[in-house]
Amino acid sequence: MILPLRKSSSPFRRLPRPLTVALLVLGFSAGSALETKASLIINEIFSSTTSSSRDWIEFVVTTDITLGALDSIWFGDTNSSTSAIEESSRFTSSEIISNFSYFTSTSDIVRAGTIIVLGGSRVTSDFTYNPLSSNPDDNGSWNFTLSNGIGFSTSLPVDLSGYSDTVWISSAQPASSTDTSNFISAITYLSVSSATGGGSIGDYVTSQSATNPAFQTVHTGSGGGYDGTFVSNTSLSNLGDSDINFSNSEGSGTRGNPNGGLNSTYISSLRAVPEPGAIIPLGLLLLSALYFRWRKQSIASPAPESSSL
Ligand SMILES: [Ca+2]
Ligand SMILES: [Ca+2]
Ligand SMILES: [Ca+2]
């Protein structure tokens, strides 16, 4: 005798339709909030020719990501001909958890609007971090600085040339000194008069910039936005939003803080989004409301008896 096969049932199969819809919506919201694909942009770079251990770079987190997801993010620079990767490091969440009171687990969230600074041994670390959507202007709560090899895999994130260089962020470890395939944001500055006058990595950044707003090349040509010398102890900063704009931006630097104007407005808008923790209670409230509505309707019109004895 062949037993009839039972049709496999979906976990949602027995749920009333409004509940199913609500669960799907809730799941989608939570999934978006915990997006693991990295989303960081380069927001500022600071060069000191007295010592590369004074150099620092600044990133803005553009979507919420887990601390653990940071571990897959690599960053660094190139040689001064922008033809090969020079420095290369990755985040190390275990060291971040050891040093921060805010982080206790790799599933903790690094909030969109966070500013992360990475520097050499002569840049002071800052492990204070307590981002709340109610305090978007409290930069000290929304930033942290990793330096001297704590929180990332080397002790020198970049060694910036006073003339030409590239700073990059990659969603995976570059497979070779010329591998740009996983770059997610990069800024190239060239002391030549053409955006295509760099090395292979500089040229890649230029070609990407045509379609990807997280990439830019500045140069000394007409409208190039760079005078050819990155004066020691100055910074180049993003004056734009997620569409980065480092043109004519050389200044004294705003380490760990938004860069003013449109950049500050953009970062404030990222920070004003409610905490991820608030999304779940909101979803539960919606579920309860739908459930009680369904109960009320069921009681008002009971289902017909399927059989009688
Ligand atoms: Ca801080
Ligand atoms: Ca370099
Ligand atoms: Ca800044």
Image (cartoon, grey):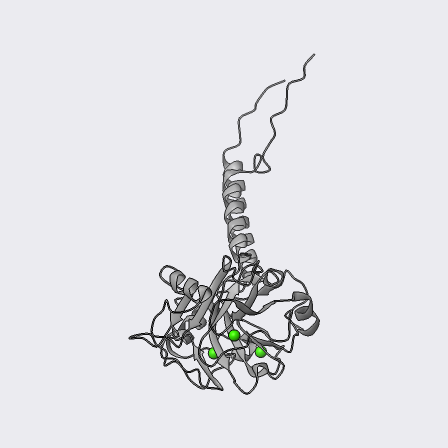
Judge by depth and name the residue closer to the eye, 300 or 144.
Answer: 144
> Residue 43: x and y, percent?
46, 73
Say whether residue 106 is left or right of residue 183: right
Q: Residue at the spot x=31%, y=75% of the render? A: 221
> Residue 222: x and y, percent?
28, 75
> Residue 191: x and y, percent?
39, 77
> Residue 94: x and y, percent?
69, 66
Judge by depth and name the residue closer to the eye, 227 or 306.
Answer: 227
- Residue 71, above or below 257: above
Q: Residue at the spot x=50%, y=36% of the render? A: 300
Say which quarter of the image contains residue 68.
bottom right
Residue 113 appears in the figure:
no
- Residue 78, above or below 251: above
Judge by depth and name the residue closer to the eye, 66 or 236.
Answer: 236
Q: Residue at the spot x=56%, y=34% of the render? A: 13
Say whether residue 245 is left or right of residue 281: left
Q: Residue at the spot x=64%, y=75% of the render? A: 155
Which residue is situated farthest in the left direction here? 222
Residue 30 appears in the figure:
yes
Quarter holding the C terminus is: top right
- Residue 296, above or below 228: above
Which residue is situated farthest in the top direction here? 1
Quarter holding the N terminus is: top right
